[in-house]
């Protein structure tokens, strides 16, 4: 009767509903599905006296992918009423299915996330294929949403408030084994036939099932006489969330509110409460930011958008890493963890061995925390071959240098390594500061040379910044991108320019903090402004960690380089502060015994009390709202300039790179999505205002003004 | 011509330690209040049928303090059933708010004789034992982003630069003053002993005071609110006050108000009614105020409340002879004195809640009696009572001896 849901009744009077949405690789909760479900439920209602049971399954590889994010992304505040009705309509259908009479069983043949898992929760029983690749759960909160298809209402009733809370607020996904342990499914089946058999057995054994919450005398698990959950827990749960998210993420807050409120009332009232919170989130700018960047743009990256055309897929077979320091060892570990053999080369066998020992320690910590088993650790370590002999690099198809940040050191290392490459192999540089084109001059075939910039700690940071040198070939770029995916990390692609993308933008954040200090703003206000907008640490704390002595010496190098090229030196009020700290006061940072902070041996770090005397600029009256905006705007404006100058080609590189690489707050969706979210016109106006008050670095770039004029957005 | 609101009398129970080993733990809150009502009636030979309302502050009006405790206690005391009862709650300002409402009714001419007061049995109805409006509404927490009172107190002390030592020194003074006042019998005019069903005395004097308190002893106490701060509330406080790098947790059980049981009452009425009943007025209520302040810092509303009450009366801070500022936390009094530029000789001259304890709903009314007794003893005229209250509120009252 409908194409999207096949309806087949057999001799045992069991109806199998097979979801198979035409023209889609996966089933999603879009208008076509809703129409099909309405028709199906209508037919079931009409024929219910001739039905012994219903099995719900899918013809796709996955069971059901979830909500229709395109539709939710388009929802505006003025669509609230329609959105609410739509959510209520969908839930009414699932409720009818659940209360129709005959047993309804979900036979989960594949991944069921979000809306898909909510459909399964509306069934009386759930069986799932025992395949660890299958993902189940309610991950909506990660995209700024909550389960609005009855997921909150049912999960709370199934597990109780306390147990359901993390599954809804944090949105984890889990495999079938874990789902069974959490009592979210009723059983596993080794194959599709067994899956259908188990569903049939359940129907035969439960001819007139009722959901637990529809049974007489139902009591919410974990509730007490005067509250839906233990009081002490109810009191601490919101605090933990506020401390973690600083009020910047509406979804986990709405989800937690919905869970508690849905627990206190009857099923239908709870369903309405859930719908209201869904509508609030779906029309909120933060969900747009998260969906845009972490669903659509991340998928573009995963699917190889921007990868040079016509290049066959590739995989590195044997990796060489030059330099067994913290970064080099980290790269070796990340590769070995993905099963890739690594030759870890340093100036001596001893130095290389030390790098491997460092990796051993990292893995041992994982084993201690039971996040890795000892056997797996041994296998990983066995893949890493430490050496002091360049000859051992023979046959590597990728060699990444991670040696000291000096041109001649790198030149010597890469020239030596190039000779060892397997035919068709390529060379990567993990430099964070030196232009790639210049480094590529040291090798015979600069087309095979590319920047592969990892972030520290390498095994935990998901981002890799790929830097194209002037002569880097499309083939090398494609291979580098494939390599990053091979490591299960996320690549962005940038053009060769000073600081590339991430370091350049991050530098504007730290220097802005220094500029505020120069104006006489109290240090605590600067640090707190950064935390208030969601930066993980304040700019002064960061500068202490990265050492102002180092920044100052890089600055001297830049001065020399630009003078040699006859280019003007960009000025910034933050440099005076850095010079004062690193040179005059000899307070270069943590490693140097102290910087903006003191680091007492027996306690937590404290802001150095001398700061107020040294930096008493008299401009300390800048309002907190300006401080907060400045720290985000300065990074967003620099990102627009990167786009203008061709350092990045599309918004996804800036968005994903800024959030995963340099801690730009996730709620913004990244530097350029943040501008979209503010609105280009409003952003340009505010930038101009900040420029008048604090300096021309806030001047809205031409590209921004012209795009704002044309009503465009950064894509 | 406005009818003046006159205070005919003020009485209170002693404060018992608010724990299972406290003397008043055996008395339930209705009984505690009813006993005091009987005492007031006996002392004034009061015809209770003449009392037009019983306004009783109670901060935790649930469980044994639930329903309308004012009415139940009046009935239990054997007061005439004509007397209605009202339970009211302005958190720690409740007992004073009851007095202020009584004064407003009399001054408006809509009542001629009202009893006002408060009760709190903190040993029997523990703070936070029952779910609050916030506990079942995470959304409200996310919207308001408030911190517990103790963290607010530490926040205010941090902002003011009041160190642990300054807080402890203030606490020591409170203990010394309270101990001296008790020893000299300065509380005796208001105190009515709590008696059992046989008329035997259960408690006759305040039992929370620690006369042997030393600065060294106070310095050894652990901060009460550091763990709460660590759990995330410090981050909320700093987010609201970003000029601070961190919160210094200076408040301890030694320099914060004590948890106690107690009740207080006062009789407020018009001059004509007093004459008719043969009651001698002791003071008049000059002006009152209640006001809110920023709710994260929460405890700084006493000064603005005081300023409003002063302005209504056309008075300046120096026109007030004695102040009773509730010692919820040492920082509250230090902030108040700094704001109004008051000398320590005028403030809490017989100690305060740090030494005596703070039976939440009763304290405000108790302080009026304490103040009135001391004005009479010293032959002074004007006094002010002021309290901070949760969620950022302040309540103030100015009285004047006749």
Image: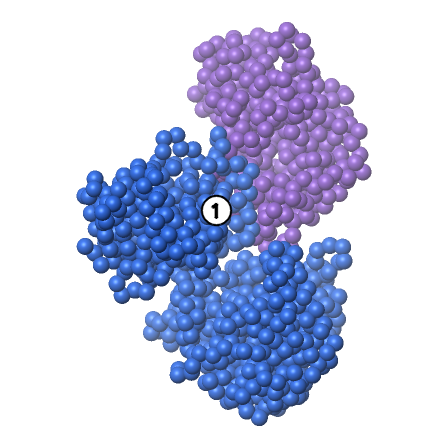
> A191 and A253: which one is in front?
A191
Q: Please state the horizontal and vertical placement of residue A5, each as a whole percent of the image.
A: 25, 55
Q: Where does the image place residue B231, in percent across and percent down from the top left? A: 61, 46
Q: Residue at x 63, y 60 (%)?
A: A374
Locate residue A365 relative to residue B59 in the image: left or right: right
Of the 4 image quadrants, the one containing the N terminus of chain A is bottom left
Q: Is residue B114 left or right of residue A285?
A: right
Classify residue B189 as left or right of residue A9. Answer: right
Q: Nearer the viewer, residue A176 or A13?
A: A13
- The image quadrant of residue A191 is bottom left
Q: Quadrant of residue A4?
A: bottom left
Q: Quadrant of residue B311?
A: top right
- Please name whichever residue, B240 or A463, is drawn nearer the observer in this view of the structure: A463
Q: Residues within 10 Å of mark 1 (few under 14, many from 20)?
A: few
Q: Chain of mark 1?
A: A
Q: Quadrant of the C terminus of chain A?
A: bottom left
> In the image, which lettered chain appears purple?
B
Q: From the rendered image, report the letter of the chain displayed in blue.
A: A
**Most extreme residue toward the bottom, as rendered?**
A444
Give whichever of A104, A276 is nearer the camera: A104
**Residue A695 to residue A175: above or below:** below
Q: Name the residue that disc number 1 marks.
A: A182
Q: Residue at x 32, y 53 (%)?
A: A57
User: Residue at horizontal 59%, vertical 13%?
Assistant: B35
* Residue found 68% across the figure and 76% down from its top: A386
Q: Is residue A242 visible?
A: yes
- Res A657 seen here: no
Secondary structure beneath dot 1 equals: loop
């Amino acid at each position: 009767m409908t194409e999207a849901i096949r309806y087949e009744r057999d001799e045992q009077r069991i109806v199998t509903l097979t979801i198979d949405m035409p023209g889609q690789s996966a089933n999603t909760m879009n208008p076509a599905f809703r129409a099909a479900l309405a028709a199906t439920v209508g037919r079931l209602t009409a024929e219910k006296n001739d039905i012994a049971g219903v099995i719900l399954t899918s013809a796709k590889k996955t069971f059901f992918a979830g909500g229709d994010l395109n539709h939710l992304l388009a929802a505006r505040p003025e669509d609230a009423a329609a959105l609410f009705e739509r959510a209520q309509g969908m839930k009414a259908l699932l409720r009818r299915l659940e209360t129709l009479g005959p047993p309804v069983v979900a036979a989960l043949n594949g991944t069921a996330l979000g809306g898909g898992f909510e459909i399964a929760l509306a069934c009386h029983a759930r069986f799932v294929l025992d395949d660890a690749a299958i993902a189940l759960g309610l991950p909506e909160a990660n995209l700024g949403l909550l389960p609005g298809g009855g997921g909150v209402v049912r999960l709370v009733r199934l597990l109780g408030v306390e147990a359901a809370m993390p599954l809804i607020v944090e949105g984890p996904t889990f495999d079938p084994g874990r789902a069974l342990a959490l009592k979210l499914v009723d059983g596993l089946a080794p194959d599709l036939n067994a899956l259908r058999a188990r569903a049939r057995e359940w129907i035969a054994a439960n001819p007139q099932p009722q959901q637990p919450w529809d049974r007489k005398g139902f009591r919410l698990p974990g509730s007490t006489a005067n509250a839906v959950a233990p009081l002490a827990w109810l009191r601490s749960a919101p605090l933990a969330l506020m401390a973690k998210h600083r009020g910047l993420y509406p979804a986990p807050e709405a989800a937690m509110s919905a869970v508690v409120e849905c627990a206190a009332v009857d099923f239908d009232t709870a369903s309405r409460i859930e719908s209201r919170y869904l509508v609030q989130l779906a029309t909120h700018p933060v969900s747009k930011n998260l969906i845009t960047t972490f669903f659509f743009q991340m998928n573009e990256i995963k699917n190889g958008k921007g990868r040079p055309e016509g290049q066959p897929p590739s995989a590195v077979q044997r990796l060489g890493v030059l330099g067994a320091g913290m970064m080099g060892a980290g790269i070796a570990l990340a590769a070995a963890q993905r099963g890739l053999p690594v030759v870890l080369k340093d100036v001596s066998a001893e130095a290389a061995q030390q790098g491997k020992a460092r990796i051993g320690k990292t893995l041992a910590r994982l084993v201690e925390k039971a996040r890795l088993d000892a056997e797996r650790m041994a296998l990983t370590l066995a893949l890493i071959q430490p050496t002091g002999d360049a000859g051992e690099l023979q046959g590597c198809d990728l060699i990444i240098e991670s040696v000291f940040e000096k041109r001649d050191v790198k030149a010597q290392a890469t020239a030596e390594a190039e000779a060892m490459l397997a035919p068709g192999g390529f060379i990567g540089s993990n430099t964070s500061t030196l232009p790639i084109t210049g480094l590529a001059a040291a090798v015979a075939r600069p087309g095979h040379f590319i920047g592969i910039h990892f972030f520290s700690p390498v095994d935990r940071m998901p981002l890799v910044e790929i830097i194209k040198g002037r002569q880097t070939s499309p083939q090398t770029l494609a291979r580098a991108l494939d390599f990053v995916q091979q490591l299960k990390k996320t690549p962005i692609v940038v053009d060769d320019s000073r600081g590339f993308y991430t370091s350049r933008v991050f530098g504007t954040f730290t220097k802005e903090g220094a500029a505020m200090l120069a104006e006489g703003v109290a240090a605590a206000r600067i640090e707190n402004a950064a935390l208030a907008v969601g930066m993980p640490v304040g700019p002064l704390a960061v500068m202490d960690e990265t050492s102002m002595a180092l920044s100052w010496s890089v600055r001297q190098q830049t001065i020399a380089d630009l003078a040699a090229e006859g280019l003007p030196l960009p000025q910034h009020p933050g440099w005076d502060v850095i010079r004062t700290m690193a040179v005059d006061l000899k307070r270069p940072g943590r490693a140097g015994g102290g910087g903006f902070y003191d680091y007492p041996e027996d306690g937590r770090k404290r802001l150095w009390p001398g700061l107020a005397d040294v930096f008493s600029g008299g401009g300390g009256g800048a309002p907190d709202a300006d401080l907060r905006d400045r720290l985000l705007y300065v990074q967003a404006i620099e990102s627009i300039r990167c786009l203008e100058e061709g350092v990045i080609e599309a918004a996804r590189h800036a968005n994903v790179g800024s959030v995963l690489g340099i801690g730009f707050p996730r709620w913004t969706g990244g530097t350029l999505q943040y501008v979209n979210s503010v609105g280009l016109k409003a952003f340009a106006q505010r930038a101009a205002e900040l420029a008048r008050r604090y300096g021309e670095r806030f001047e809205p770039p031409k590209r921004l003004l012209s795009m704002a004029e044309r009503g465009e957005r950064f894509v | 011509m406005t009818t003046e609101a006159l205070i005919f009398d003020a009485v209170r129970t002693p404060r018992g330690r608010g724990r299972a080993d406290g003397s008043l733990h055996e008395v339930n809150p209705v009984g505690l209040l009813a006993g005091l009502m009987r005492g007031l009636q006996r002392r004034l030979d009061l015809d209770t049928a003449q009392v037009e309302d019983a306004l009783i502050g109670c901060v935790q009006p649930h469980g044994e303090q639930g329903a309308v405790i004012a009415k139940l206690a009046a009935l239990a005391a054997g007061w005439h059933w004509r007397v209605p009862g009202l339970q009211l709650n302005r958190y720690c300002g409740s007992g004073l708010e009851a007095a202020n409402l009584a004064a407003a009714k009399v001054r408006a001419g809509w009542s001629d004789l009202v009893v006002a007061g408060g009760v709190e049995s903190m040993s029997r109805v523990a703070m936070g034992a029952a779910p609050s409006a916030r506990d079942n509404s995470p959304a409200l927490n996310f919207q308001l982003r408030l911190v517990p009172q103790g963290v607010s107190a530490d926040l205010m002390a941090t902002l003011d630069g009041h160190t642990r030592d300054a807080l402890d020194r203030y606490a020591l003074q409170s203990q010394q003053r309270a101990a001296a006042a008790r020893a000299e019998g300065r509380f005796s005019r208001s105190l009515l002993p709590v008696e059992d069903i046989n008329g035997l005395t259960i408690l006759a004097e305040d039992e929370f005071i620690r006369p042997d308190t030393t600065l060294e002893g106070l310095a050894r106490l652990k901060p009460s609110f550091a763990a709460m701060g660590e759990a995330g509330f410090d981050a909320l406080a700093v987010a609201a006050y970003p000029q601070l790098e961190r919160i210094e947790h200076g408040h301890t059980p030694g320099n914060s108000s004590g948890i106690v049981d107690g009740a207080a009452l006062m009789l407020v009425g018009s001059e004509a009614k007093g004459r008719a009943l043969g009651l001698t007025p002791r003071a008049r209520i000059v002006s009152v105020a209640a006001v809110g302040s920023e709710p994260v810092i929460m405890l700084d509303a006493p000064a603005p409340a005081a300023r409003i009450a002063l302005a209504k009366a056309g008075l300046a801070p120096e026109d007030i002879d004695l102040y009773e500022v509730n010692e919820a936390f040492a920082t509250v009094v230090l902030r108040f004195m700094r704001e109004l530029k008051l000398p320590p000789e005028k403030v809490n001259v017989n100690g305060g809640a740090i030494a005596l304890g703070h039976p939440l709903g009763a304290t405000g009314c108790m302080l009026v009696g304490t103040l009135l007794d001391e004005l009479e003893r010293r032959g002074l005229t004007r006094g002010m009572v002021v309290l901070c209250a949760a969620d950022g509120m302040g309540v103030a009252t100015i009285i004047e001896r006749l």
